[in-house]
Every structure is written in C-alpha cells, then in structure tokens.
Amino acid sequence: MADPSTTPDAARPGRLHPYRALLGSRVRSQLTYRTSFAFEVFNSLSFAVLEFVEVYLIFHNTVLLGGLGVVESFLVFALARSGFALADLVAGQLDTIPSIVRAGTLDTMMLRPLPVLAQLILGDVQLRRLARLTLYVVVLIVTLPRAPVDWTPARVALVPATVVGGGLIFTGLFIAAGALQFRLVDGGEVANAFTYGGGYVASYSTAVLPAPARAFFTAVVPAAFVGYLPTLALLGRTGPVGLPGWLGWYTLPVGGLTVTAALALWRNGLQHYQGGGG
C-alpha cells in the first residue's frame, strides 16, 4: 500500500470531495426519475405563481398598500421572495430535523467525520426549489424597469446585494429554527412561524403591521430588511416611525450577523443534544 505521505497531491481526494459526493448523489437521485421530477417542478412553479397572483388580486381592491403602489409592492414581493427562495434552496431542508431526531438518524450523522449541518444541508437538496427561485428572479427583472427608481451605481448594486442578504437572513432563520429542535420535543410548527411566516411577512409592506409587530419583524426576525426596507432605499423614501428608509442599505451585513448568531445557536443546541430517545 502506498504511503499517503508520498502520494501526489493531485491523486489525493480534496477536502471538498465528501461534500461534492453528497450533493452529487442527491442531484442524481432526483434526475433519475425525470417524470416525477417534472411534476415536482410544476408543483413548485404553481405555488410560486399563486403567491404572485395573491399580490395582484390585492390591488384589485386597493390602490395603495402600506404607502406603496402596485409596482412598488411587486418590487417588495420580488426582492423578498427571491431572497427567501435562495435560502429555501440552500437550507430549507432543515425543517425536517424533528423527524430526523425522532428517527435517530441524527445520532448516525454525529458519528461521521463531517459537520452535521453540512450533512443535513447537502444530503437533501431539492432541485425543484430552483424553479421557484428562477421565477421570482424573472419577476424581479421585469419589475425593476417599471419601478420609479432614480438609478445610480449604488442602487444597481443594492439589488443583488439585497437578494443575497435576504438569502443569508432566511438561511440564518432556518439554521436557528433547526437549533431550536434540539431543545423541543416537536417544535416544527413553532420554527415554521419564524421561517415561512417571516417569508410571508417580508413579501408585503411592513408599514401595514402594528408598531409592536413592525419592531418584532425588524429587530428579532429581520424580515423587513429582505424586501420592504430595500425597496424604500431604492425609491429614496422614508419609512414609518422607527423604520428609516436608509436601513435598507444594510440588508447584507444584517444577513451576515443573522447567520453568525444562528451558527452560535446551532453549536449550542448540538452540544445539548441528548439523542433521539429511541
């Protein structure tokens, strides 16, 4: 047997090889059954279209929603849903942690020489979610030229920064919600209130919420940073009391802080995990 110390570097598996193998096996398993995969993509797109239609129908009964017209509201929707769909593609599978804990599968993952979080994320990537992300990005691209924005280089850069920052915010929320499962018997519904509930709130003007709810979805669950505040920054408008429009420029750093805090919660939760009980 060859001495590993004398094996050429090119012949050694890279550090990322286990992660590529996990991701590759998951992708291949979904593409093997193409008819099933096509139906999953269709269902995912149908759900996304219904969300879009919901916003459209609201403006059949009102001219302004939270101080924003139909085009501005579609901009909030497109920014928020693009960021959420990006996070859902990356980390949405973490909402299955309760069933994984009950089945004792997590105990097996902890024996492997890979981070548990990486195994959970890469082991159940859902390609159908990519279809939703694509649709939301298309809606964003169509909406941007119609929005009354005085475009500058900074505002152009703000759009992709907002989508990435929104993705980081909701990725952090998915991780934090997953960490919560280590301390609750079955906290899936509680966790979904912060992740999917936050995604729904982010899709509309935060100004429609009462002041306590606005504070919660800004300081605790930073959903306002995903769509509403960046839209105000793009439009050059001020927000309601307590929500100045310039906060919309800080979506990306807020996303970084959210992920950092969520990872700390994850490490703490994993340290206190005591097994599936089976």
Image (cartoon, grey):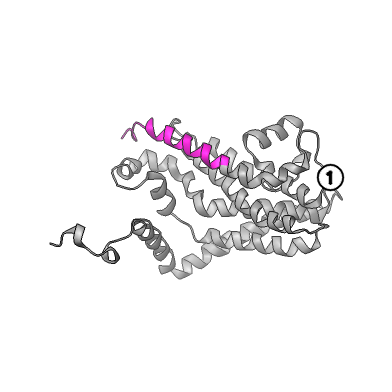
Residue 120 in sight here = yes
Q: What kind of element bears circle 1?
A: loop
Residue shown at the point (85%, 48%) measured from the top left: 64
Give percent across and percent down for residue 244.
77, 39
Quadrant for the C terminus in the image:
top left
Q: Is residue 274 magenta?
A: yes
Q: Amino acid at mark 1?
A: Gly
| Nearer the observer, 222 or 95 | 222
Residue shown at the point (54%, 51%) measured from the top left: 88
The vertical placement of 194 against 5, above or below, is above
Residue 196 in sight here = no
As drawn, the residue found furthest toward the right would be: 63
The quadrant in which residue 210 appears is: top right
The quadrant in which residue 154 appears is: bottom right
Query: Horizontal placement of 159 versus 58: left or right?
Result: left
Question: Pointer 1: what residue?
Answer: 67
The quadrant in which residue 169 appears is: top right
Query: Horizontal placement of 151 versus 46: left or right?
Result: right
As drawn, the residue found furthest toward the left would be: 1
| Nearer the observer, 109 or 36 | 109
Q: Is residue 220 magenta?
A: no
Give percent across and percent down for residue 75.
74, 55
The vertical placement of 150 against 270, above or below, is below
Give percent across and percent down for residue 86.
57, 54
Query: Horizontal placement of 24 versus 53: left or right?
Result: left
Residue shown at the point (83%, 57%) measured from the top left: 148
- Label 1 crowding class (10 Å Cα cut-off): few <14, some 14-19, many 20+? some
| Nearer the observer, 243 or 178 | 243
Give percent across and percent down for residue 77.
71, 52
Quadrant for the N terminus in the image:
bottom left
Q: Which residues are magenta?
A: 257-278
**Type of secondary structure dominating the magenta stretch:** helix
